[in-house]
Amino acid sequence: MAKSKNGTVFCCSDCGYESAKWMGQCPGCKGWNTFVEEQVDKSPYKAANFSQTSGRARGERTQPSVLSQIEIRPDDRISTGIGELDRVLGGGLVQGSLTLVGGDPGIGKSTLLLQVCRNLSSEGHDVLYISGEESLAQIKMRADRIGQFTDKMLLLCETDLDVISEVIRTRRPEAVVIDSIQTMYSENVSSAPGSVSQVRESTGILLQLAKGLGVSVMIVGHVTKEGTVAGPRVLEHMVDAVLYFEGDRHASYRILRGVKNRFGSTNEIGVFEMRENGLTEVKNASEYMLSGRPEDANGSVVTCTMEGTRPLLVEIQALVCHSNFGIPRRQTTGTDFNRVNLLMAVLEKRSGLQLGSCDAYVNITGGIKVQEPAVDLGIVLAVLSSFKNQAIPRKLAAFGEVGLSGEVRAVSQARQRAAEAEKLGFTSCVVPSVCAAECEKNSGIKIIGVGSVREVIERLF
């Protein structure tokens, strides 16, 4: 009897590495216990589907183009009608792009994309919303809370990519939303929907549709408990942009962060607020992050971080108290734990403060995560303020990087940071001394230049 062409293979759920047998550690990404068993069809690959989805005639070959003769039209981008989303995307949706939106369950991914569909359809663009998780009635109930939709908005509940490809080729919409990629399946792959092979194959077909037909495709991706998009890592390499929706789903704020973007900056963020009628963009994010700040409380300092081209003021809170145990406890929220320990060691070594026997808790308010070294000076001031029980002036902001020798080093875009503090009514700003001259140009705010943490203590405490 002839051997069956079908077999099993073990795939890494993180990077997509394939192996004939199960292994504890993946040789590709070095992850542990990531191999899953999948059924694989070893018959010849059906490449005809790609020629159909790409919009080219069978047998037709693409020809190389001269780079200098390629024209970029201004209408290649489509505005989503949401300013914060356009900022993260780099100016709007690019025709023929493939965008991946990931986030925790209930964070608002489907609501955001449904609002995008509403704005695009109201501007006369043909939009197709494809859902593999909800029924038409469920989508209609959510759409009624958002607002009125025009006849340019079409809904389709389907998970078979062959049917979806045929509908897209027939209707030729300008934008397509896939909710979600883990529910889609192709008959070319024998494994179950959501598996590594199915997600990779489904993304490949959608990529061919987007590039071949010039359709802007936005796909929703589930995330794992580690916070990354579920499925093989190659999924993020195939798409043009990867957006993460962050924030506590029990709170009202949401942060949309771009971690990959072939058409714009990868460090931009958009701030939204969840309301009854959907997501509302927060245009003045700094003021929103500082709302509810306590009056004359020690351990509270405002610093400025850069998210792409956007300066953002955030509040840093610190609580330092003597420990009753042999080993003091250190805890951070929103910033790097090791960085806080390093800064406290610098304070103890360079300024003579006895912090080794103290518990320390540092928190970045607003639920935002800050990894930029420019917030070092803000963390130092917050720790000093709590340790000495002296409140920092409410209208004072600070930013700067602190080195191991206790020096305060220069940071990029210092003028924009000081201008953002001035715009929100701050009267003074502590900056690195090498950036003081730049910040004082055409500035109505008092600039305090410091060169070391010892000088910070002498001038402010």
Image: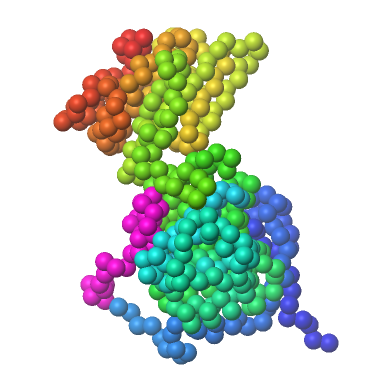
Residue 200 at x, y percent in the picture: 58, 67
Is residue 346 visible in the rendered image? The answer is no
Q: Up-down: is 114 above or below 453?
A: below
Q: Quadrant of the C terminus?
A: top left
Q: Which residue is drawn at 47% across and 89% down?
A: 58
Q: Which of 112 and 200 is in front in this view?
A: 112
Q: In the image, is 73 to the left or to the right of 325? A: left
Q: In the image, is 67 to the left or to the right of 180? A: left
Residue 371 at x, y percent in the picture: 45, 36
Q: Does the magenta stretch include residue 70?
A: yes
Q: Up-down: is 55 above or below 296?
A: below
Give the residue furthest to the right.
1
Q: Residue at x 74, y 74 (%)?
A: 7
What's the magenta region?
66-94
Snapshot quadrant of residue 68: bottom left
Q: Which of 14 and 252 is in front in this view?
A: 252
Is residue 325 visible in the rendered image? The answer is yes
